[in-house]
Amino acid sequence: QQQVKQSPQSLIVQKGGISIINCAYENTAFDYFPWYQQFPGKGPALLIAIRPDVSEKKEGRFTISFNKSAKQFSLHIMDSQPGDSATYFCAAGLGGGATNKLIFGTGTLLAVQP
Amino acid sequence: DTAVSQTPKYLVTQMGNDKSIKCEQNLGHDTMYWYKQDSKKFLKIMFSYNNKELIINETVPNRFSPKSPDKAHLNLHINSLELGDSAVYFCASSQGRGDNEQFFGPGTRLTVL
């Protein structure tokens, strides 16, 4: 019940295309859903996050879509660029809980071809 | 102006040895974490400290012992290293216990031979 399932494992997109990464969770108590971006040799960095009281959040070319009833959320990268090539992790957490534990998905390696 | 720093960046050692990884954050955060990222890039929380108090302790072998001398530092000591301990270890920090952004360090790549 603590798992966060992420797909696909890897993704190749042409420059200018749309990259879509999907995640699903089981624990309905989760109320915080961030996406982290990790470049090779670096630590993960927060990209964008959403709470379940909204169905969509957009920041620049990055959009999270959230479906509470389906317990699914996804990251859309519009106009994908070679600089977006990285590993993307979705995560779920309990924002108001006693701890700030994040459960991470298994990661998606995105390659944007020029 | 590194926000979260770790030392060393690389650590190569023999099975059975004891080693430590140090972490420091200059963000003024009160919560720090240790994560393990395995060869398949799976990222898993190991420990979390809030104001020097242990608040998350996942099912990690007791060969791993975190120590937080103050809010800005969280060290990880590993006894009797095993081959399976080879991974990248990330330190992170955040402010508070809620859903605030976690800032990750650059990682320490541990290789056990």
Image (spheres, coloured by chain):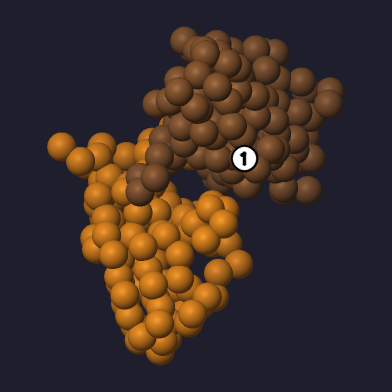
B37 relative position to B2: left or right:
right
B16 versus A26 height, above or below = below
B110 versus A71 height, above or below = below
A38 relative position to B74: left or right:
right
> In the image, what residue occupies the spot 75% across and 38% down?
A25
Residue A67 or residue B32, whichever sits in front:
A67
Q: Which chain is orange?
A: B
Q: Chain of mark 1?
A: A
Residue A52 or residue A25, whichever sits in front:
A25
Colour given to chain A in the rendered image: brown
Please provide percent x and percent y for residue A57: 59, 13
Please provide percent x and percent y for residue B11: 30, 70
Residue A60 or residue B45, whichever sits in front:
A60
> In the image, what residue occupies the spot 28% across and 45% down?
B4
Return the residue at label 1: A10
Q: Residues within 10 Å of mark 1 (few under 14, many from 20)?
A: few
